[in-house]
Amino acid sequence: MCKKNKTKQKKIIIITKRTTKPMNTQENSCRIAILHTSNMSQEAVNGVPCRGKVLTLDTMNPNVKRVEYAVRGPIVQRAVQIEKELREGAKKPFTEVIKANIGDAHAMGQKPVTFLRQVLALCSYPELLEDNKFPEDAKKRARRILGACGGQSIGAYSASQGIECVRQDVARYIEKRDGGIPSNPDNIYLSTGASDAIVTMLKLLVCGEGRGRTGVMISIPQYPLYSAALADLGAVQINYYLDEDKCWSLDIKELRRAVTEARQHCNPRVLCIINPGNPTGQVQSRQCIEDVIRFAKEEHLFLMADEVYQDNVYAEGCAFHSFKKVLFEMGPEYSSTVEMASFHSTSKCYMGECGFRGGYMEVINLDPEVKAQLIKLVSVRLCPPVPGQALLDLVVNPPQPDEPSHTTFMKERTAVLAALAEKARLTEQVFNTVPGITCNPVQGAMYTFPRITLPQKAIDKAKEAGQVPDMFYCMRLLEEEGICLVPGSGFGQREGTFHFRMTILPPTEKLKIVLQKIRDFHQRFTQEFS
Amino acid sequence: NSPPHRKWSERKVTIFTPMSDQQETGPTMRRLSQLESVVLWNRARQIKRELKQGVKKPYREVIDISWGDPQGGGIKPLSFVRQVLAACHYPQLLNSDKLPEDVRQRAERLLKECAGRSTGSYTATQGIPYIVKGISEFITRRDGGVPSFPNNIYISSGSQCMSAVKTGVLTPVPCYDKVNMSIRELGGVTIPYYLHEDQGWELQIEELNRALESAKGVCNPVALYVMNPGNPTGSLPQRRSSFSWLMSEFVSYKKVLAEMGPPISETVELASFHSASKGLIGECGLRGGYVELVNVDPAVMEYIYKLFSTDSCASVPGQIALNLMTHPPQPGDPSYSLYNEVIMTITQLIVFEVLNSVPGFSCQPVEGGGFAFPRLHLPLNAIHKAKEAGMQPDEFYCVRLLEESGLLVNPGWNFEQKEGTSHFRMNIMIKEETLEGVLRRLVSFHTKFMKEFS
């Protein structure tokens, strides 16, 4: 019996078995082929089951089909292709592709912080501890980190939860940040970037069948790691809309609407908040955070607080308040009951060390038995990359005022954050001068998410081309100007509205040019389709 | 004479603690089976703490050979590797002549391939293209010219490919425990096939067939997992005469597949995994590994790409380690002689000889991998004592071994084994001096133990 293979390549595999037992086929899949070295004879073509591939779109985990990650999606793949064409000498209206699609500061020319890299070099090649060109405070930290590593080497596995002294330093950092509210190192789990920890928590939380399936509340717009993870895990995604007209603020009424509606078809258990927001950049007010915590308690939801941009706050009157701090300041009625996980990373803020994949989560009020399971779960991947753990230790344990590297460190840190604040302001200003583009203030994070008005003709043209309108727009921008953005559809947006996400990371002079090009493009585009 | 086997269906998790045996809670975690001995690790942690506090014991330190971690076990990293990494992270080092010329050249080359010349930037999803290309060249060289395509290679900080495959996976017994855990974590079912211990842990086709048959009607087997060299067994899948195992060579599954010619070579779907954690380079903590996919449906490849992209990219230090593994210094390079001074000591031979000379031990030849997996022939009294204590026999042995000699090994129970047998796994990627100490402690304890329970 032949199976009709739906894949493009229709390969028929003929394998002769030494037994005469017929092979059963089950549904759309074929039994695994046994590695027999046997004769391939002509008679094998007829009357013997032929096999397509074992792994096809039909036999693949069906959840995977729903996974999308726009930040590295089709537009980025096209951008990479264009870069290749440029390298091969193709003539284009631009000489380079500006990748303003991904929150990667170093790729856009931001310099790494000297102190961090000195310690990493020392940890990587400890012979450098004899080199007097390295400052004493860097050496001290390197020795401490190496002392905590197996065999005094960052090449050894660490405990799955992360190096103990790093977790202790993280706990101390959190305590200092949150005005003395205690943090227990046992509640800290180091991870491979924050993404790893976020997915781990979701794995723990998602369960149930049918109407009892876990529902996870996520903002629209959101960072598409969440939607991808929810799709992969087969969780129910519950959308709550941020209010664009009110600077992307979060409204409890909207949260309640979303959860009430969701209870009809799933079991809402989780509420995800990104603060400062990605892609929207809004910074939650303290009052808002309190309201969210109250809501989570009332609706019996597990809070996931994604706070990776906590140092990236620019707007006047805005400040970062950690969910944990607010929770504890609300008193024991909340602080001893609301279950929460907060996430942080070395990829953003002033460090921008994306490639090291450093991060952590702090869990609050987690059931002790579940914590034991969590340790098991993280142990499957053995441990997070040790250089990332070392880097995290430096982030939470930076040079102090009485240490030699302090001045340079503060200078570099301040310069990076100041530049970002300036670029945030510049971006909002320029975009708001363009008819057809409206841009909310970039209060924090690293992105702008302006709304674009597209002429109906453009929307129709997009539909003809089988593309979502903002993808159509962004692809044109890429082809004409060599600027790579991510269409708003990749993050979620209200029906009938269109956006794009652009990073504010290119160096100021380049950013000015980029803004100008987008402005010119938008005017041309609008003209073309009017 | 088929080996008895446990019911392979999903195992419930049982957490062994001194206080109680609790069934694990939480429906999501029910799939994640773990047969790990919590008692042993907790006790090891405790003993290390006690030693630090100055408590008197018959030994001064715990020798931990339960993990496959060469550097954790005291083996020094390769200078070339660490010099290049340091220079990549802190390019100021390139301005001086302190580092050898080839180190500086390689660091320059790698930095050129990093966005913004920084190891802190994200990379392409599959890995830095220059490094991925290097891996494909390495594979081709290793496999005597069998082509390898960069598009089929993904660098990762851990095995991420599994998400695309559900249901039944044939896995060896014994097997590296994380494999079974990963499969079950994803909702898959492991179908055990038993390696034949008496024949050097041979993988027998008849046993594969039996395992496959056992899955009939119960799950849908889609994948066969093989480990070459084996962990914990250290076996290589080849026939050999009694002494030719000393000359066994690693041959990759991909190479053999290619040599079998079409149609098999063009149809059997294969994923091969490798890592910078083992071998000469031993950089476990950097988390660098890769998978090469062969004959995978192009439509599925698109989704594999998507899955990997949600993790952004593998850690850059890990990617760099892979490059240094696939392209080590060449003859004539300044770092070449130092790099090759690292001799693979014949620890395998020593271990094999010693263990097979002691009554109550038997050990198959360790042809590869980094571990020995000796069999314990425990007296009945010991087995009963273990049962009383609520432990598996090899776990009981290992706990006593730890308490009395400060040696920490990994009980065979964690890797699954034929019912009624006992083993433990020990890391042999350790310094020769350490190995001497290890064997001394082990043999001395074992002799006492066997006497006590005879």
Image: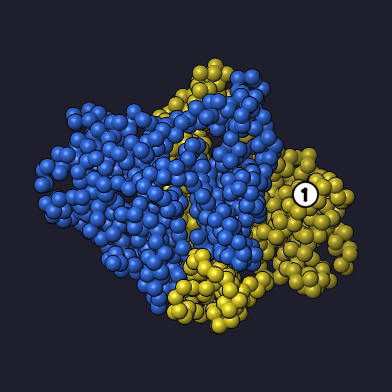
Chain colours: A yellow, B blue
Where in the figure is residue A327, as x and y percent of width and height?
42, 51
**Relative height, residue B430 to residue B242 (above, below):** above
Who's the residue at 27% across and 57% down the image? B15
**Relative height, residue A296 to residue A519 (above, below):** below
Where in the figure is residue A227, as x and y percent of width and height?
57, 63
**Residue B445, quarter of picture:** top left
Q: Looking at numbered disc 1 in the image, what kind of residue is underneath it?
A: Glu
For the question of whether residue B393 can be seen, the reply is yes
Q: Name the residue beneath numbered marker 1.
A: A83
Q: Residues within 10 Å of mark 1 (few under 14, many from 20)?
A: some
In what quadrant of the picture does the N terminus of chain B appear?
bottom left
Q: Which chain does tag 1 point to?
A: A
How many numbered circles does the render carry? 1
Where in the figure is residue A98, as x and y percent of width and height?
76, 47
Who's the residue at 54% across and 79% down the image? A49
> In the depicted view, which residue is nearer to us: B258 or A166?
B258
Who's the residue at 47% across and 35% down the image? A154
Image position of B378 (left or right of A486): left
Image position of A324 (left or right of B16): right
**Relative height, residue A196 to residue B89 (above, below):** below
> In the depicted view, which residue is nearer to us: B391 or B241?
B241
Who's the residue at 31% across and 61% down the image? B13
Q: Residue furthest top?
A: A132
